[in-house]
Amino acid sequence: MAFPESVKLQALKDSGGRCQCHREHVGKRAAHHGGRCPKIFTGRRTWHAHHIVAGGSDTLSNCEVLCIPCHKLTRTYGR
């Protein structure tokens, strides 16, 4: 499923233009983490809208904005 554009834009606004990832990425290479990812978005092609609950609803409450490197480190990326 995919988020409507309005949900993605609201999630981006709510994020303050920053990656919302707080994951530790255990066993994976991640230059940050020990808190929130420091990535600030500079354009549309620098972030993805990610389902917090895979296969869940396409609503704002199930949407988080992640930088592409953090999104690729999620266990459900590309599924």
Image (spheres, rainbow, N blue to C red):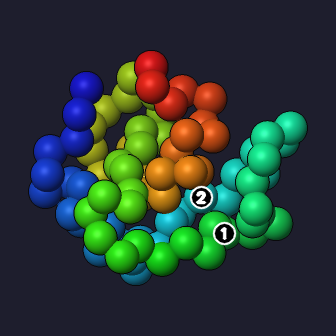
Please give the name of the residue rendered at 22% of the width and 41% of the height, measured from the top-left corner. Answer: 3
Q: What secondary structure is marked by label 1? A: loop
The C terminus sits in image quarter? top left
| Residue ID for mark 1 | 36
Q: Is residue 61 visible?
A: no
| Vertical placement of residue 5 versus 41, above or below | above
Inspect the image, locate mark 2, and give the three-letter code of the amino acid beneath it: Cys
Inspect the image, locate mark 1, and give the three-letter code of the amino acid beneath it: Arg
Q: Are marks 2 and 1 in contact (CB under 8 Å)?
A: yes
| Vertical placement of residue 63 versus 13, above or below | above
The answer to which of marks 2 and 1 sits earlier in the sequence is 2
The N terminus sits in image quarter? top left
Please give the name of the residue rendered at 66% of the width and 69% of the height, measured from the top-left corner. Answer: 36
Q: What secondary structure is marked by label 2? A: loop
Classify residue 38 by image quadrant: bottom right
Please give the name of the residue rendered at 30% of the width and 52% of the height, measured from the top-left corner. Answer: 60
- Left or right of 24? Residue 68 is left
- Left or right of 47? Residue 32 is right
| Residue ID for mark 2 | 21
Classify residue 59 by image quadrant: top left
Q: Is residue 64 visible?
A: yes
| Vertical placement of residue 3 versus 35, above or below | above
- Left or right of 32? Residue 67 is left
**In this view of the protein, which residue sits in the foreground, 11 or 71?**
71
Callout 2 crowding tier (Cα within 10 Å): few <14, some 14–19, many ≥20 = many
